[in-house]
Amino acid sequence: MKPQVIIIGRPNVGKSTLFNRLIGKRLALVDDQPGVTRDRRSGDAEIAGLQFTVVDTAGWEDEDPETLPGRMRSQTEVSLEGADAALFVVDARSGLTPLDGEIGRWLRSQEVPIVPVANKAEGRQGEAGVLEAYSLGFGEPIAVSAEHGEGIADLFGALWPIIGAKAEAAEAQPEADESDDEAPLGPLKLAIVGRPNAGKSTLINRLLGEERLLTGPEAGITRDSIAIDWQWNDPKSGEAREIRLIDTAGMRKKRNVVDKLEKLSVADARRAVDFAEVVVLLLDATQGLEHQDLKIASMVLEEGRALIVAINKWDVAGEAGTEDASSLFNGIKAALNDGLAQVRGLPVLAVSARTGKGLDTMLRAAFEIRESWSKRVPTAALNRWFDDALEANPPPAPKGKRIKLRYITQVGTRPPRFVVFGSRLDALPTSYERYLVNGIRDKLGFDAVPVRVTLKSSK
Ligand code: GDP
Ligand code: GDP
């Protein structure tokens, strides 16, 4: 069960507007007239990855809005029973009213944790009202503008310590969440890209040919189809694993274009990444790494796909003797690391499409990298790392003013995406951003996958 957050306050303070803001829809009826509300409604809310159910209460309105009508009160009491937190909303512009005080007194007798929220505080307006809201006795009021979406990150900061653990537990239960994040991983969608003559067709034939022997003629493999579903038996674990192979080599051959080869292999790769989760960039060991290969690799990473580099024709390159072979291998690996700032520790493997050497290792690596590409780090662990990282290397203070970084949250997977909240972010040097991105990769196990980090001002 997701945590439940209830919105409470007298009429016209902006409860519906806040409700809409939190569920991300313009759904509820909002009106300048006090008392237009409506039945109790609830919806799925999310602030930067923190997921909860938000409940908009019927409010406290009656014929006389400045009294506390028992009927409404009992309804709200019912809502409070299931709530994990309550947002007590006041209007920072109009200041506190006796009814606010009355609701506050009543809330104090309840057991649910209260977060005081001073709404309509956009710009600097309502500053006095925000200060006044201290007198409600619930601690520091969170200044927000429901209408303009300001202060929502601070709301996250206030809610997270209260409901974060429950939200994570709910997220961990697959049936509680239908977002594709949590869906079981289906067949591995794999594409093999690379320059002409790298050996893509040979590789695909090799993979499927072996599999034919294993699975028989009824396996449903269609050579001309673009996506080929097949089963790979991992000889190490004995596990049968499903793979959907995107046959870009086939696409290229069909189009039968001989010139503009350079352009073409990039175009093929681009098409492939539309379908693929993991992309294998096939290099030709006899040719070494070329600019074109780096271009394809960059594109794959920019598209947010997981990348593996396989150096093909190792049966030939390896012949030259171990020393030459290893210097060739290390040279390519170093050039990849230099050329691709987007990732570190990219899996680089030596294979031979002709002999089949290294192909099982390559497929195993593909399944593995898909795991980290799809992984979600619990918010608690994430913020523990974040606090440590800030402590070890605090953000700079350009012109004597400190840049504040407040929270981090993972907003998505495939590829992993993060948002860092803070203030004065314009002044944050890119070197510091890099420091954070590298930390996420090294410390949280996102080594070889592209990681996206966005900075968001939380005012
Ligand atoms: P409720 O009765 O508490 O649900 O309040 P509503 O959400 O219906 O809002 C009451 C009025 O306040 C509407 O006219 C809203 O447009 C306005 N309002 C809500 N939030 C804000 C805000 O952040 N700033 C300003 N200036 N007006 C707001
Ligand atoms: P594609 O253009 O990327 O599809 O490349 P092909 O699969 O058509 O292969 C190009 C050439 O490289 C062919 O002559 C293949 O026989 C050869 N080739 C492919 N893989 C290997 C390999 O692992 N070892 C060796 N020695 N040759 C290979």
Image (spheres, helix red, strand yellow):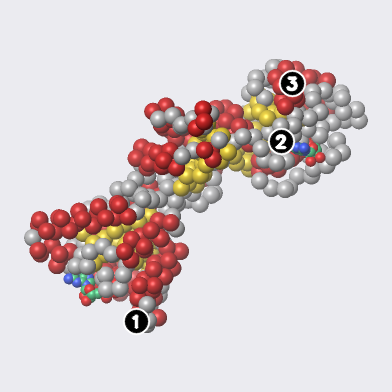
- Which quarter holds ligand 2? bottom left
- Amino acid under label 2? Glu
* Disc 3 residue crowd, few under 14, some 14–19, many 20+, Cα 10 Å: some
Locate residue 331, reporting x and y percent. 21, 55
Locate residue 455, reporting x and y percent. 52, 42
Q: Is residue 17 left or right of residue 215?
A: right
Is residue 37 depicted above or below 207 in this figure? above
Locate residue 425, reporting x and y percent. 53, 38
The Cα–Cα distance between marks 2 and 1, rounded to whole angstroms, is: 61 Å
Answer yes or no: disc 3 within 8 Å of ligand 1.
no
Q: Which mark is residue 122?
A: 2
Q: Quadrant of the N terminus?
A: top right
Q: Is any atom of residue 171 visible in this view? A: no
The residue at which mark 1 appears reads as 258
- Judged from the image, the secondary structure of the residue bearing numbered disc 2 is loop
- Amino acid under label 3? Glu
Q: Are marks 2 and 3 in contact (CB under 8 Å)?
A: no
The residue at which mark 3 appears reads as 132
Name the outermost residue toward the front.
Answer: 399
Which residue is painted at 31% across and 64% down in the image?
291
Q: Nearer the viewer, residue 229 or 446?
A: 446
Q: Nearer the viewer, residue 105 or 345?
A: 345
